[in-house]
């Protein structure tokens, strides 16, 4: 099955100009566009008054600080292998071992299946930042700094050599339990700086 990625955009600091490949107009301080996977799980991200959605694209940040955003999900299963563990909502890069290695994430929230509303819904908050220190106990690195200042004009390998990663607000099955299909509860909302 071919996967189709969809994303949306937000500017994290009102009134601050950002230089990028495309200029996207701001339309609303409270709206968010949902990203939906092939199985109907949907995640939207919105933030405080300083967060402005700019239509389809990605979450765009322009400051070096962090901001708390709200993730709202619907259509999630949360019942991988019949265990009912729910999902994680995390911020950071999606590395090969993302489902079992929490060290790469700058912030994470566990949403238990028992906390889901009807239709597989939930709401939680999560912090996003331009850079943060990875947990060395999980990554094997000596407190590596993860920079989410990914340069789309370079390869992923070139970015990684500079400590720069493509970061997301993302969801996946909780506690390392694989779903079937594995990406049933996986949604990624890109975050660029």
Image: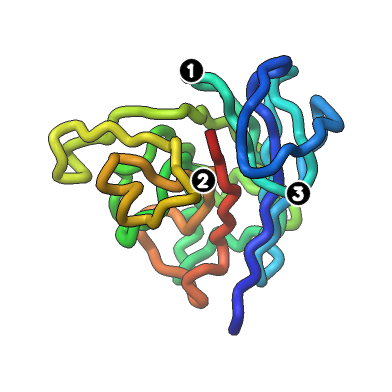
Of 90 and 115, nearer the camera is: 90
Residue pictured at 61% horizontal, 31% vertical: 19
Residue picked out by circle 1:
65
**Label 3 neighbour load within 10 Å: few <14, some 14-19, many 20+:** some
Q: Is residue 60 left or right of residue 89?
A: right
* Callout 2 crowding tier (Cα within 10 Å): few <14, some 14–19, many ≥20: many
Q: Quadrant of residue 106?
A: top left
Mark earlier in primary sequence (3, 1): 3
- Residues marked 1 and 2 touching at CB (< 8 Å): no
User: What kind of element bears circle 3?
Assistant: loop
User: Which of these two is toward me, 192 or 35?
Assistant: 192
Q: List x then y, in percent, for residue 174.
A: 44, 54
Check disc 1: other Cα within 10 Å, few if <14, some if 14-19, many if 20+: few
- What residue is shown with label 2? 168
Whole-percent x, y for residue 158 in the image: 32, 51
Tell me which numbered mark, 1 or 2, is placed earlier along the sequence. Answer: 1
SS for tag 2?
A: strand
Measuring 68% from the left and 59% from the top, which residue is drawn there? 6
Name the residue tied to disc 3.
56
Mark 2 and mark 3 in contact (Cβ < 8 Å)?
Answer: no
| 191 to 99, vertically: above or below | above
Q: Residue 8 — which label?
A: none
Q: Are marks 3 and 1 in contact (CB under 8 Å)?
A: no
Gap in angstroms between the C-alphas marked 3 and 2: 15 Å
Q: Nearer the viewer, residue 75 or 191?
A: 191
Q: Residue furthest right?
A: 27
């Amino acid at each position: 099955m071919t996967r189709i990625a969809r994303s949306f955009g937000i500017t994290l600091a009102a009134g601050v100009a950002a230089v990028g490949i495309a200029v996207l107009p701001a339309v609303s301080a409270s709206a968010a566009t949902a990203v939906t996977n092939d199985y109907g799980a949907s995640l939207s991200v919105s933030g405080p008054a300083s967060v402005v959605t700019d239509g389809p694209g990605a979450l765009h940040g322009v400051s070096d600080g962090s901001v708390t955003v709200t993730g709202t999900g619907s259509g999630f299963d949360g019942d991988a292998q019949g265990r009912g563990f729910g999902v994680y909502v995390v911020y950071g890069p999606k590395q090969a071992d993302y489902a079992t290695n929490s060290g790469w994430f700058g912030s994470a929230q566990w949403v238990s299946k028992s906390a889901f509303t009807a239709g597989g819904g939930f709401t939680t908050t999560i912090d996003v930042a331009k850079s943060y220190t990875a947990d060395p106990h999980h990554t094997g690195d000596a407190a590596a700094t993860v920079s989410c200042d990914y340069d789309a004009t370079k390869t992923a390998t070139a970015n990684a050599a500079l400590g720069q990663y493509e970061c997301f607000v993302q969801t996946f099955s909780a506690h390392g339990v694989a779903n079937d299909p594995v990406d049933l509860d996986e949604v990624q909302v890109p975050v660029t700086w």
